[in-house]
Amino acid sequence: MRYLPLTEADREAMLAVIGADSVDELFRDVPDSARRTTPVDLPMHQDEASVERTFRALAARNLSPASCPSFLGAGIYRHHVPAAVDHLIQRGEFMTAYTPYQPEIAQGTLQYLFEFQTQVALITGMEVANASLYDGATACAEAVAMACRATRRRRILVSGGLHPHYRAVAETYCRFLSLDLTTLPPCWSGDEEPSPRVDADTACVVVQNPDLFGRVHDYSGLARACHAQGALLVVAVAEVVSLGMLAPPGAMGADIVAGEGQSLGNAASFGGPTVGLMATRDRFVRQMPGRLVGETVDLDGRRGFVLTLSTREQHIRREKATSNICTNSGLCALAFTIHLALLGEAGFTRLAEVNHARACQLAEALATVPDVNVLNRTFFNEITVRLPRDAGSVVDALAARGILGGVPLSRLLPAWREAQPLLLLAATETVNDQDIDALVAALREVL
Amino acid sequence: MAVAAETISGHRGLILEEPLLFEQGSPEKCGVDLPPAPPTGDHLAGLRRRGAIGLPGLSEPEVVRHYLRLSQKNYSIDSGLFPLGSCTMKHNPRLNEVVARLPGLGDLHPLQPVATVQGALSLMHTLAHWLQTLTGLPAVALSPAAGAHGELVGMMAIRAALEDRGDPRRRVLVPESAHGTNPASAAACGYAVDAIPADARGRVDVERLRAALAPDVAAVMVTNPNTCGLFETDVQEIAEAAHAVGAFFYCDGANFNAIVGRVRPGDLGVDCMHINLHKTFSTPHGGGGPGSGPVVMSAALAPFAPVPFVVKDGDGFRLVEHTMHAAGKPFGRAKGFHGQFGMFVRALAYMMSMGADGLYQASADAVLAANYILASLEGSLSAPFPGPCMHEALFDDRFLRDTGVTTLDFAKALIDEGFHPMTVYFPLVVHGAMLVEPTETESKASLDQFIATMKGLAARASAGDAAHFRDAPHRAPRRRLDETRAARKPVLRWRPTDVDRAAE
């Protein structure tokens, strides 16, 4: 058993020091009826090669998006992650460290989180960001709860363009906190107008940019309408690469930004783990959930970093904390921050431009396919098209031809009848001309 | 100790100072070669960002050096013994990392057609089977993102089950020794929290608990083994008492490492328990996440478990992603997509590597190591409760009385000795607590060195050398940091200095 360093002789010697005859004696506080004296009914231990073979066999039963043309998005995007990222995050000093409770020997983690907070604040156009949350969906739910604390109000208005998982998680959190959440119906044919529904009881309005359908919006007017009523504007960002090109939520007047950071540094990994982003205005920082790293000095006057404002948190405040959150998404935040460090200002902008250009090419190519209607007038790297029949069956037919041809909206919105023929397709920098040609050719066959 | 003169560079041998990213590079540099964007139209509706973001630009070698230098300022399990009680800092096998990155696992998209991810769903189904078998509970929600999130999901299922009976109830009972996440999770489910004191044996005071139990109690949340490192000897009585008033028994599974493979929580009367895959099942802590916190549930709670979940249909698997498609009454969704799949892969690789026999041995070794430390330090440190302990040994600060050394000072002195400190000042029920969890992945030589160091420091404290402790650490990348200053005037991000702005 390669992970267990103690030998039988060690165990005997240790038991002698303890004054026990056997390990079983150390478990004597466990009621007899529950104490097992033999292993449970599961397979016995295996060597590395055997375990690896098992997982290779499992992997072989899946279609790897890296091995075929893939246009999947809807909140998780395939981007090229530079080799240095995965190498660095696997350094034992990062990967096998804990939450930095002892700052003298955790400056590595603390400094990268401080840099991460700065990067997130900069790209979202906000004043301050935390050290990450679980994912975009939970970050959005936490933003809703935070807005209710900050405004001392209980009404939430959610755009129909918010990712259905984000909406569902926010609904769950609100239900148990007895908060009053209303969702506008999905609307792809025109602009929804939440502004008239914002009133003096509204805690926040939650929108997404780009929205579920891939459209980009100027939320400045909505921000003004919210602020006029003392409500906050929460903007969700599910594709963080869009911020390389788009005006950030901060510039539109957002009060809280909740985002998904997977696109930078992190593999799709079947949807998790990823990294939730949260940024806000300075005046709301004490209402924020999650870890925050702050700058200070040590006894010798050297700059250093510590976890701070922990009086918001559960280990101090217990049931009165801003959230029950204990961890962040440390290693995923590290991958995010390294990728963004490698890109820098020029690379981040260029990456966004390549994504947008690929999506433009995709939209133009799809428009040439008979009976395929591109619905978006605006988009960043993702578009919605209407097909002449059920999008789910088309996607299945494409998959049978080795093409991952997007996400049928009915998969995310099964109760919304109009979703049936709608297909969501993303084009990132990993998509090339051959991929688009293959998709178009296959669609002509399938439809 | 003679203090060496400051160096010209600011570096001190292998302790290399590293400025912030934002203090390096120049905007035109880039560490990634990207093709120019092909010429196309613009569909951004005039919403293009105006002005620069303010990100620094660095080449790949500069970035690699930056993070390598930062990494060297961290203590980690790979560096040495990391006896952080309640956190289970055990070895993180590298096989787990390899398999989590395999094409066909690491790159899977969560919304691929289900027919193209049968291997992934089979993997999740197998993980669920291991967790169910090891806990003796029939259902599991895999999706929670971390332990605290698992608590929240478990408590939501409990509330949903009670609401279904038409009686959501009002209160949750939580022992004083509990992790802070327990009361915070109960509060996030809309419950009032009543604290139950510990008895003189470091266990839940069962009489006080019985007195607090009433028909308005939704659940009792107990950590077992508890945060004092002790098994709750009355756990079955607690479960029965909770059930007698119609309440559920929630177990915080943070310390499952102590009993995995030897005790099934289901046999103790537990209705619901989260499992920290990053503790018991060796997935990396990663400097504070990502975690993964599947929740096992009894048959009574199973219908209320959240979406998504995997269902086996004949030879294939399908995913139930919406409450409208579920046979039961799921309370909803608590996490985007399907949970921390990358952590499922790692945890299952660990389980298969260890096997039923290896897990049975692992919990034995974890408990043995903690008791070895407890016994070896008897007479040097002070333990508030007699042994045997489970996987962690708890000490208080009585042995430091009149020495002028505090628990914090003692912990900081351990840093100079090359160890990560133990958990300090937790649990709250013990004065100046020091909670030592060695885990099963330390050799006897490593444990002996730690014990000798602890004894030596205790002797030094009683010999009156408080000065040695007060200023510790001396040999770490930083000395003690001014946390009061950080909280009083928070600086939470880098901002350009006036000089930088003038140069723009």
Image (cartoon, coloured by chain):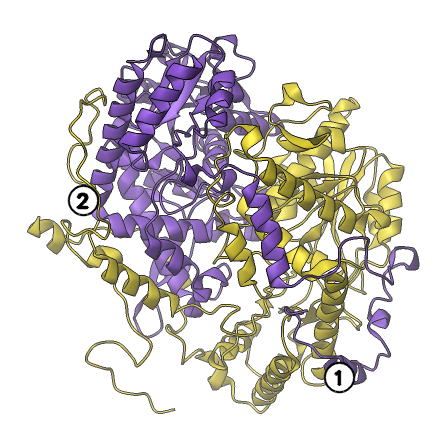
Chain colours: A purple, B yellow
The dot on residue A227 is none
Q: How would you rate the neighbour count of disc 1 (Cα within 10 Å): few for under 14, some for 14-19, many for 20 or more?
A: few
Q: Which mark is residue A346?
A: 2
* Quarter location, residue B451: bottom right
Q: What is the chain identity of the residue bearing mark 1?
A: A
Q: Are marks 2 and 1 in contact (CB under 8 Å)?
A: no
Is B323 left or right of A362, judged from the image as shown?
right
> Which badge, 2 or 1, is on the more N-terminal residue?
1
Please tell me which residue lies in front, A384 or A183. Answer: A384
Say whether residue B280 is visible: no
In the image: residue A403, left or right of residue A355: right
Q: Provide residue A148's location: percent of width, then percent of height.
A: 48, 29
Q: Position of residue B445 (x, y in %)?
A: 62, 83
Alpha carbon distance from label 2 to label 1 = 61 Å
Q: Where's the C terminus of chain A, which quadrant?
A: top left
The spot of residue B488 in percent (x, y) is: 37, 55
Left or right: A262, with B374 as reference point = left
Q: Nearer the viewer, residue B236 or B114?
A: B114
